[in-house]
Image: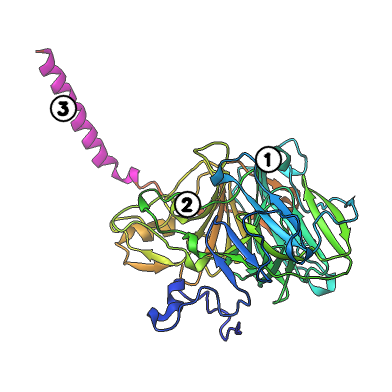
Amino acid sequence: MPTTLENPREYQDIFHWAETQKDGSIPSFGVRKNDPYEYQPGFNNIFESEAVPGTIPKGQNSPRCVRFGLYAEQMTASAFVAPRHLNKKAWLYRARPAVAHQGFTELPDNKDTESNFLPINPRIHVSPTQLAWLPFDVPSASSGEVDFISGLKTIAGSGDPTLREGLAVHTFLANTSMKNRAMVNSDGDYLIVPQQGALDIQTEFGKLFVQPGEICVIQRGQRFKVMLPDGETRGYILEIWGSNFQLPELGPLGANGLANARDFLHPVASYQIEIAPWEIIYKLGGKTFKSTQNHSPFDVVAWHGNYIPYKYDLTKFVNVGSISVDHIDPSIFCVLTAPSRDAAAPLADFLIFSPRWDVASHTYRPPYYHRNAASELMGLIYGEYAGRSDEFQPGGVSFECGFVPHGVAYEEFKAASAQPPPEMQISKGAVAFMMESSRPFTITDWAWGHEKKHEHEPKMWDNLVDNFSTHKEEVDKILAAVAAAGVKKLAVNKD
């Protein structure tokens, strides 16, 4: 049975999930103590689950009669002829199939969400300016009920879902649970990052309890409903089109490290039989449509397949890094990646910066000054993140587009260069993340005009002094000696 946490920061304060195992002095456990649900571990496995034993047909998928009079329904998420390792599907055995609905009605456009990020769209903005946003406010109860669907706001993105290539970054700001209402994203996959308040998510495959410090992925076409056990909630969403999330390759790391496959958790079957009016919200091409039905969409008694929603606890991430000198590229922080049509450039990466040791010797420890091809959008789940201004707060956003230079202020550069740093734990009590893409991002009207927006202050780099010029006399002597040696060598060669 789940227990209430005496310390709400219990999982924020730990250095790694391993601390919860008490050096093997207690029976090991894989979920947080206050998580009410059971799960199946693994990533991209073939899973099966049945709420009533003996329901799933064996040796076939679609028998003439399914036990208990259930209907067999297949959800296919890839081309039928996709290679076996890329083929995504699930069989669901349910009281009534999803086709039993009363048609679709187009809903008015939500002016705070966006799906077309092409520069010809007048509702988006292109800028090389380094932008940031203070935490967005959650709607108060006095402003009315706002659930997960109504509270979606789009910040930035690239591409268009109808092209099956692109992504979008959203925030969700909600103060009430979804009632008899479910959502289907027909455009792409949602990677959901709660920052404030837990999410109790009901899906066709079962239930997921996702707390700050955890993430979940609800894939394209899967119906879900979000309840708010803690009341107000705020968080982030990375939406991808035309791809699915997968684990990054480990290369010379070998078989283990970063996010291990066994730590991803999938729900177990949990059905709801209810005769009542339900509203299903479909998102397609960025537009929303409503379908009504007189039965619960979560009436799946059993299922099997590999196209299943899942969650992951970020405190289980196994950090790697340099144990001699210099930095390793930030790809070592990648939890999930989504490939693009360019084999050398991912559509999206989800990276985290969590507690770890920093021990590199003779090395400038802060992030070095850099320009890189990727668009970078950062958020903070909890704690403080070194290397950013005080205005980078939990629930806020920081953004830099490709090839825009960035790095720390001179004071931090000078301090880090002055003396050898000790071996130290960094990011204690903090988890920040980066949503990164090889594609350029554009900014939505909602985010561009938001009162929480501000620019990274360029003046923070005004005092990056020219140290090189103070060595002019020494450099001139070296250059003169080199020139003289060159003249002497040229004379010898002529002789």
Q: Quadrant of residue 153?
A: bottom right
**Sequence-first tag of 1 and 3:** 1
Task: Count numbered badges in the picture.
Answer: 3
**What x and y, as percent, mark residue 382?**
56, 69
The N terminus - image quarter: bottom right
* Spatial CA span between label 2 and label 3: 39 Å
Secondary structure found at label 2: loop
Front disc: 2 or 3? 2
Q: Is residue 470 visible?
A: yes
Q: Is residue 465 left or right of residue 5?
A: left
The mark lying in front, picked from 1 and 2, is 1
Q: In the displayed structure, does residue 146 sit left or right of residue 170?
A: right
Q: Which mark is residue 164?
A: 1
Q: Given the image, on which type of amino acid does mark 3 rest?
A: Ala
* Callouts 1 and 3 close, C-beta under 8 Å: no
Residue 485: give its label: 3
Residue at 42% x, 51% y is 250
Tell me the kind of residue under disc 2.
Answer: Gly
Q: Position of residue 111 (x, y in %)?
A: 81, 51
Q: Residue at x 20, y 30 (%)?
A: 482
